[in-house]
Image: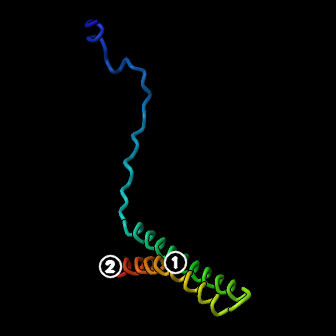
Amino acid sequence: MADQEENFSVEDLDIDEYELIPDPQPIKDLDVIKVKREDVRGLLAVVFLIGFFFILLAGIFIAAINEGNKVESLTAVLLSISGILSGPLGFVIGYYFRSKDQK
């Protein structure tokens, strides 16, 4: 066995030549990532704001077509919707504008 190890050479192996894979280029402009992140934050804030007003208008419409005392119905709907969604809306808008001011 030792005799076989001594006669071994790398040239005896049947290995095809290969190309070296170039090193991947590092990202030099990290501002691109920050811009994309800000774009997504802004888009989410706008979508949440539009959704809030859509739900608010749908509630007003439902209260308007409801039979009975329309003022009480409208008041109940507005209080319910604004009570549930105004907290998250304030959080989303505050987070978006806070992150823009910190730059």
Where's the N terminus, which quadrant? top left
Q: Which residue is rendered at x = 59% and y = 89% of the image?
A: 75
Would you place residue 28 above or below residue 11 in this image?
Answer: below
- Give the percent coordinates (x, y) of residue 69: 68, 92
In the image, residue 56 sits, relative to residue 34, either above or below, namely below
Q: Position of residue 32 (x, y in %)?
A: 42, 68
Q: Is residue 87 left or right of residue 62?
A: left
Q: To which residue does mark 1 refer?
A: 84
Q: Earlier in the sequence, mark 1 or mark 2?
A: 1
Q: Position of residue 44 (x, y in %)?
A: 51, 73
- In percent of the image, x 49 and y 81: which residue is there? 86
Along the horizontal axis of the image, is 81 left or right of 26?
right
Number of numbered markers:
2
Q: Give the amino acid at mark 1.
A: Ile
Q: What residue do we see at 30% from left, 8% from top?
A: 4
Q: Residue 76 bears which disc, if any?
A: none
Would residue 19 appear left or right of 70 to someone viewing this image? left
The residue positioned 48% from the left and 71% from the top of the image is 40
Dot 2 amino acid type: Gln
Question: Could you classify mark 1 by the number of other residues whose Cα lies within 10 Å: few (under 14), some (14-19), or many (20 or more)?
Answer: few
| Residue of label 2 | 102
Q: Quadrant of residue 100?
A: bottom left
Q: Nearer the viewer, residue 96 or 7?
A: 96
Between residue 80 and residue 23, name the one nearer to us. Answer: 80
Q: CA distance from mark 1 to mark 2?
A: 29 Å
Q: Nearer the viewer, residue 100 or 15?
A: 100
Q: Secondary structure at mark 1?
A: helix
Q: Position of residue 15 (x, y in %)?
A: 42, 25
**Nearest the eye: 65 or 90:** 65
